[in-house]
């Protein structure tokens, strides 16, 4: 199952439309999308406008692949749960957000090789279509706690005050 999430603040029709088109190539794969108040009405994927946190977590846990906007909450959840994730940032040129912070987030995580990033719809389709059946694995696991080196560094700083 592929779980698509766009966050709760605003629609992301560009992503939903792309995943609806991708679904035509995956008729045997269930694709569920949390779409908020989308203006695009998909015909090939199951959609939900709103999910309770419990429903969201159930779909997230069941998914073989997460496809998402470049929201920190979703990225961190995927890294902690060791879920492969493909993100596509919302862009101001499409009036999907008020600034380019999602692009900056995506670029940094891409530089670190922590997540799969699609910078456009063509790249999104290529990544999803070429990797879904090839045992897509998470690129990085984020633990529930800060690294010992960070904790030690903060401790050293505090004691020096």
Image: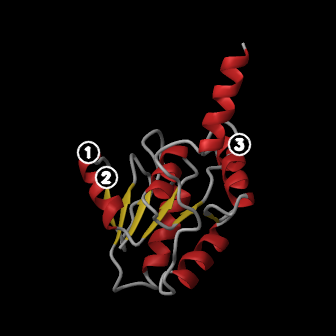
Residue holding disc 1:
52
> Distance of mark 3 from mark 1, alpha carbons?
28 Å
Q: Pointer 2 and pointer 3: residues touching (CB < 8 Å)?
A: no
Residue at 49 percent across and 45 percent down: it is 73
Residue at 48 percent across and 69 percent down: it is 19
Q: Quadrant of the C terminus?
A: top right
Q: 33 or 72: nearer the eye?
A: 72
Residue holding disc 3:
100
Say which quarter of the image contains residue 60: bottom left
Q: Neighbour class for label 2 at 10 Å: few (<14), some, many (≥20)?
A: some
Residue 40 image position (x, y, % from top left)? 44, 58
Q: 121 or 158: nearer the eye?
A: 158
> Distance of mark 2 from mark 3, alpha carbons?
26 Å
Where is 135 relative to 8, above or below?
below
Q: Pointer 1 and pointer 2: residues touching (CB < 8 Å)?
A: yes
Say which mark, if any, is on residue 56.
2
Give the left or right position of residue 51, taking residue 26 as reference: left
């Amino acid at each position: 199952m592929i779980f698509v999430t766009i966050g709760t603040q605003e629609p992301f029709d560009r992503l939903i439309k792309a995943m609806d088109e991708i679904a035509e190539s995956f008729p045997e794969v269930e694709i569920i999308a949390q779409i908020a108040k989308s203006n695009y009405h998909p015909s090939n994927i199951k959609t939900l406008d709103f999910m309770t946190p419990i429903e969201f977590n159930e779909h997230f846990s069941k998914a073989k692949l997460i496809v998402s906007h470049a929201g920190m909450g979703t990225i961190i959840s995927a890294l902690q749960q060791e879920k492969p994730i493909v993100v596509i940032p919302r862009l101001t040129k499409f009036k999907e957000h008020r600034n380019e912070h999602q692009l900056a987030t995506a670029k940094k995580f891409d530089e670190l090789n922590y997540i799969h990033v699609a910078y456009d719809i063509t790249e999104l389709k290529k990544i999803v279509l070429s990797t879904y059946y090839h045992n897509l694995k998470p690129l990085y696991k984020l633990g529930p706690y800060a690294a010992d080196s960070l904790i030690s560094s903060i401790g050293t700083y505090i004691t020096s005050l």
